[in-house]
Image (spheres, grey):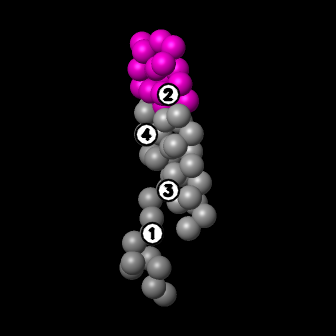
Amino acid sequence: MVRHVLVVLEVVFALTVLVGVALVYVPAALILGGLAGVVAVERALSEPPPASREEVRP
């Protein structure tokens, strides 16, 4: 539960920063958004896959 709340807060913070940058310079916000997307995908792929049900049961 706490992990989900932290992920939501992280996403809201990142979007707020991107909107703030977009108010100043839109191309910079697009570049930062793309970089943030790459980082998010790399983080998601680096986590180990969840264990299957057969592995959990003894």
Q: Nearer the viewer, mark 4 or mark 2?
A: 2
Asked if residue 32 lies in the magenta stretch, the reply is: yes
Residue 18 is marked as: 2
- Looking at the rendered image, the disc whose residue lies closer to the viewer, 4 or 1, is 4
Residue picked out by circle 4: 41
Callouts 3 and 4 close, C-beta under 8 Å? no
Residue count near mark 4 (Cα–Cα under 10 Å), binned few <14, some 14–19, many ≥20: few
- Can you name the residue that lies furthest to the front here? 23
Q: Earlier in the sequence, mark 3 or mark 4?
A: 4
Q: Are marks 1 and 2 in contact (CB under 8 Å)?
A: no
* Magenta stretch secondary structure, dominant: helix
**Residue 54 visible to the viewer:** yes
Camera-side residue of 20 and 48: 20
> In this orientation, which residue lies closer to the viewer: 35 or 15?
15
Residue 48 disc label? 3
| Circle 2 or circle 3, nearest the eye | 2
Residue type at numbered disc 3: Pro
Which SS class for mark 4? helix
Amino acid tagged 2 = Leu
